Image (cartoon, rainbow, N blue to C red):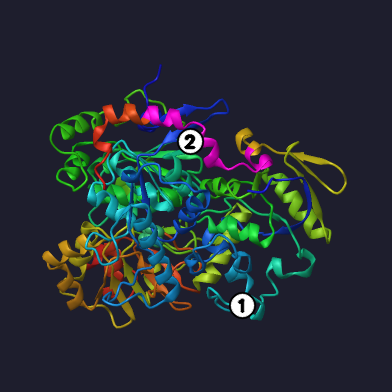
Amino acid sequence: MEKFVKFDGIVAPLDRANVDTDLIIPKQFLKSIKRTGFGPNLFDELRYLDEGQPGQDCSQRPLNPEFVLNKPRYKGASVLLARRNFGCGSSREHAPWALTDFGFKTVLAPSFADIFFNNSFKNGLLPIVLSEETIDELFRAVEANEGYQLTVDLASQQIIKPDGSTIAFEVDPFRKHCLLEGLDDIGLTLQDAELIKEYEAKRRETAPWLFDAIK
Amino acid sequence: MAGKTLYDKLWDAHIVKQREDGTALIYIDRQLLHEVTSPQAFEGLRLAGRKPWRLDANIATPDHNVPTTDRSGPIEDEVSRIQVQTLDDNCDEFGILEFKMNDSRQGIVHVMGPEQGATLPGMTIVCGDSHTATHGAFGALAHGIGTSEVEHVLATQCLIQKKMKSMLIKVDGELAAGVTAKDVVLAIIAKIGTAGGTGYAIEFGGSVMQGLSMEGRMTVCNMAIEAGARSGMVAVDDKTIEYFRGRPFAPTGANWDKAVEYWRTLHSDADAEFDVVLELDGSAIKPQVSWGTSPEMVVAIDEALPDPDQEADPVKAEGMRRAYQYMGLKPGITMGEVVPDRVFIGSCTNSRIEDLRAAAEVAKGRKVSDKVKQAMVVPGSGLVKQQAEEEGLDKIFIEAGFEWREPGCSMCLAMNADRLGEGEHCASTSNRNFEGRQGYGGRTHLVSPAMAAAAAVAGRFIDVRELA
Ligand code: SF4
């Protein structure tokens, strides 16, 4: 995983609550056996006027001009401003893959669904929880100012607005560390391999039926 | 000191290492694998030169992409075929037991796991699928994970987790005739909302939950995720234990006795404290139908659809307006005015034998209305299908004009050929009514199996009790 560095990005506002993972990346694209290439199908049903098929050349498809990501002013956006319960629904990691493949580095929302929240960190996408009021204010600011940008600084846990004022945010220290260092969770866990083996040996004694039944 | 909740007990029993930052390394007893969320995980293992930590902790079956029609030839859709083939190849290469497409034990992972005894009380169970909460019905700690975590569990048999908060949802009273587990869980979601359980592990209790069969408890836990909770669970009782007697992977002999002794401890202590306790009167629950595009947009069958103008929360009101537009419905009407173009009985929520029996009871001696283009029944597994056929349920369905299909996820998410056309309404026993979930532009209405069958024969949504 790449290290998460401080960046400035254009903010795109997605003004609806309960954006589910089916909406972020519809199921027909889940048939891929790869981790990349989902960006062109991000929000497929909102973004295009026709029904998308896997493997299709999306540059030839009719765009929905009303959809926020199709508006020229949000071109190149890397900050997604969203409403509550973002990422609800299925556990598909294709949702963060599609968001990052499109170019998003962070999503700001009043709340996130648990699995999506968790999956994001594993893929270098930073979900930031802000109060409803702060989110409302940001929606107004983005609406009023074309080219509105924010600076996201994970190290200091701050979002810096164009006028220099800041919004502090919370992030779990372990997840922050992993993002900043671009660490692979598996490698970290395997450092505890001995502990896992000890646990397993004990469990084999107390609950032998959990072992060797399936072969 | 207060006693422990069921969740506390399951959590404590699986801590490998408590970290200072509040997270813990949690041991995973069982991982269920299917074709959609595993290919990238196996690929990750290969790229890093890693092997699965423990083969006997894993079991796989393809479910999302498999056709539910004739399976004698290869899968027609090339992309689906490659995905299923990739699962087969990965399981063969790494040595993981898989029930392949034409094995009678193949089925939806969440139906197959318990049926085989691959799910057991007291386990931690994960799967790259959000409906893994289903397995909590057996007093297990089960939750859905993403593909990176699938890889993590394959490689380490552990997950890094933070303990969730605890919620007890108590449903007391007695269910009225015709009201099922599905109606109970839809009523719960309507009450607490799709984010009501976010951050919580939910225990479902009360006399209604105790009265439900294991199938019914699975239906309720299955949809915990629709209330935002990654895990739902129910305490172990005699029914739970009896369910596992004789299942292929369940313990036998002395191990059985030892296991049962442990399983009997899997309930919340009387003095356990929950972060939140919610109570519902089960006697007041009527058959439920979802009208909108979120599982919280639910009404009782005789209730008028809500008016967004009366909704105080502007974000919610906006969501309702959008849902009305998408669904082509109006506030104030009742669901009795809506004609289902298609009817789908299946999915990991409602495709077990009891669900099929309930639907068959309604279908028996009746005919699917000619207003309905298609009504299909998709059993949850090959074994459910076999049993249903032994009981003659297939004949009842076929005589009534339903299609009798091969097991899989099917129209629950329409990754195979089974799907809704644009603008079509569907009476569906599945769990999600999101935009496009059952097909591009499709309009899903979540109901119980009996209510779905009733809608099929009546040609409109109807209180199943009116048919009696
Ligand atoms: S039946 Fe539906 S919800 Fe269940 S695992 Fe399959 S696709 Fe997911």
Residue drawn where x is 19% and y is 29% of the image: B258
**Observer-nearest of A100 and A23:** A100
Which of the chains bears the disc numbered 2?
B
Look at the image and give the residue range highlighted in magenta: A178-199
Question: Could you say where residue A164 lies in the image, as x and y percent from the top left?
Answer: 87, 43
Quadrant of the image where one finds ligand 1: bottom left
Residue B285, visible in the rendered structure: no
Q: Is residue B198 left or right of residue A164?
A: left
Q: Is residue B152 left or right of residue B283?
A: right
Query: At label 2, which amino acid type do we have?
Result: Met
Q: Is residue B177 left or right of residue A8?
A: left
Residue drawn where x is 45% and y is 71% of the image: B443
The residue where tag 1 is placed is A57
Which of the chains bears the disc numbered 1?
A
Query: At label 1, which amino acid type do we have?
Result: Asp
| Residue B164, numbered label | 2
Q: Is residue B235 left or right of residue A133?
A: left
Residue B213, visible in the rendered structure: yes
Circles 1 and 2 in contact, beta carbons < 8 Å: no
Mark 1 falls on what kind of element? loop
For label 2, count other residues whose C-alpha is less than 10 Å away and answer few (under 14), some (14-19) or many (20+). Answer: some
In this rendering, the answer to whether B262 lies above or below A32 is above
Co-location on one chain, circles 1 and 2: no
Q: How many marks?
A: 2
